[in-house]
Image (tube, rainbow, N blue to C red):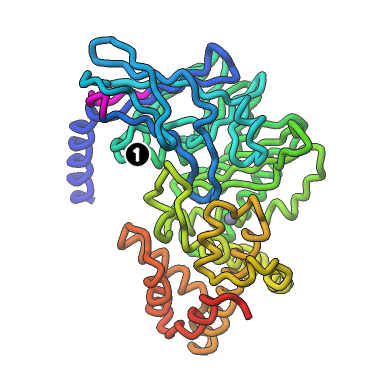
Amino acid sequence: MRRFIVLFSFILSITSLNAQQKISYLLDNKADLNKVTIEITFDALSATDAKLVIPRSAPGTYILTNYLAFVDDVVGYTATGKQLPGMIGDGSFFTFGESNELLNKVSYTVDIQKMEIDLLDASTSSKAREDYLGLFGYSVFGFVEGLENEAIHLTIKTDPSWPVFSTLRPDINRKNGTDSYEAENYAVLVDAQYLLGKGVQVIRVEEAQIPLFVATYAETSIDLEGIGKRGLLALQQLADYFEYIPMPHYTLVYEFLNPISERHDYGFNMEHLNSMTAHRDISKEYDTNRDLGSIIHHIGHSWVPLRSWGEGYHPFAWQVAPLIETIWLNEGFIWYVSYYEILKNEEILNWWQSNMDNAPDFIKNKSLKELSLLGSTQYASDFRIGKNLFSRGALMAHDLDNYIQQQTNGIKSFKEAILGLLSWSKDNKRAFKYNEIEPIMSKATGVDLSPVWDKWQNAPE
Ligand SMILES: [Zn+2]
């Protein structure tokens, strides 16, 4: 206990030393409720070197999204008070000219309404309503290249009567008009969601092992407690399976929306470190049984891949949609845990197999790695690719499960394999390489898993 206290005060003093170097973000949504203004203040650097990067993708989205299209009024500010207009670069970034003047602030606006109209997949877009602003961090926050790893102090300012909520620090007691948050770095800042406005409802779910919240915006009447109950059940079942919970707190974010057009798709949900975001089209029926499976799946992602991941997933190349070789693992292993292990749905094996059998040739003839590379940008846009990836991953998990149980007389199972990956990541704090996956699982189970692994690497016969 004493050692702990000494260590703690040491960390505190280091933190206060670093406090001055912190980057400040200001999100302002007062002037026009459909737009946000972002200001980023940082230690001055030469205007020629400064690049404001706008993300083009985010971990787990497996899609290329041109968020730059909704960014306008980009301005750089010099230490002497001069304004330099931002110019679009050769990629998803802005530059500020050739001068040697020192730049210490940039600002820009993001048109949330335009974003929602243009992006047909509701799971990629932020939303603006009369009484609501729901923001995905990566859809509004850019970064100054080179400063991605710096700690961030964020201030949010909105209408004085609007409560402010963020999954960074969930709380049922919300401040009105303004609040501020600390984020370890850019990746943490943009992984979070920000929900502003009188239309947002927040409840805390009692009896959960960690602080558990439901935050919603609904254009119909909804059963908030019901979502909370399913969230609690999902969390408990995952905790029983993995035997620990790595998240400090968790928020289920739900939007129940009137579709803004027939072409808009509300089918996909998104996982984050300590939250999930679900979207429901209120003109369609809402199946609470299916919802439970989806909640287990998305909370399950807080273990894999969010805390055990392959190369490309983290650290993330924000300016592109990076190629990722392990989407089948990220998705398939969690599909297997959620539906086969926790929900005991044995029939789902047939569905996974039929997804593989019914795939077009351009999917069928790809090796596991090739299909994952293809899915890095087109996982949901051609969902036959996404379905094939998680089906192959889940069926591989099932084969591994059977093989491990057979070789160990039922003493070990797939669970030891996935726990092995998680504990490896905790120790090594980096992405595992593709050729490290099988040895990590083999070591954790004490079974040479290469026969099963090798079989699944090829295109299916
Ligand atoms: Zn998923």
Q: Nearer the viewer, residue 264 or 5?
A: 264
Residue ID at (63%, 21%): 198
Residue ID at (44%, 68%): 419
The kind of secondary structure the magenta stretch mainly shows is: strand
Q: Position of residue 252 (x, y in %)?
A: 59, 43
- Asked if residue 210 is among those painted magenta in the image, a careful observer would answer no
Q: Nearer the viewer, residue 97 or 178?
A: 97
* Residue segment shown in magenta: 40-48
Residue ID at (57%, 65%): 332
Q: Is residue 144 left or right of residue 157?
A: left
From the image, tell me which residue sits under label 1: 185
Residue 151 visible in this rendered orientation of the protein: yes
Q: Position of residue 167 (x, y in %)?
A: 50, 37
Q: Is residue 211 left or right of residue 383?
A: left
Q: Nearer the viewer, residue 29 or 242?
A: 29
| Image position of 284 with respect to 337: above or below | above
> Residue type at mark 1?
Asn
**Residue 183 occupies which quadrant of the picture?**
top left
Q: Position of residue 104 (x, y in %)?
A: 27, 21
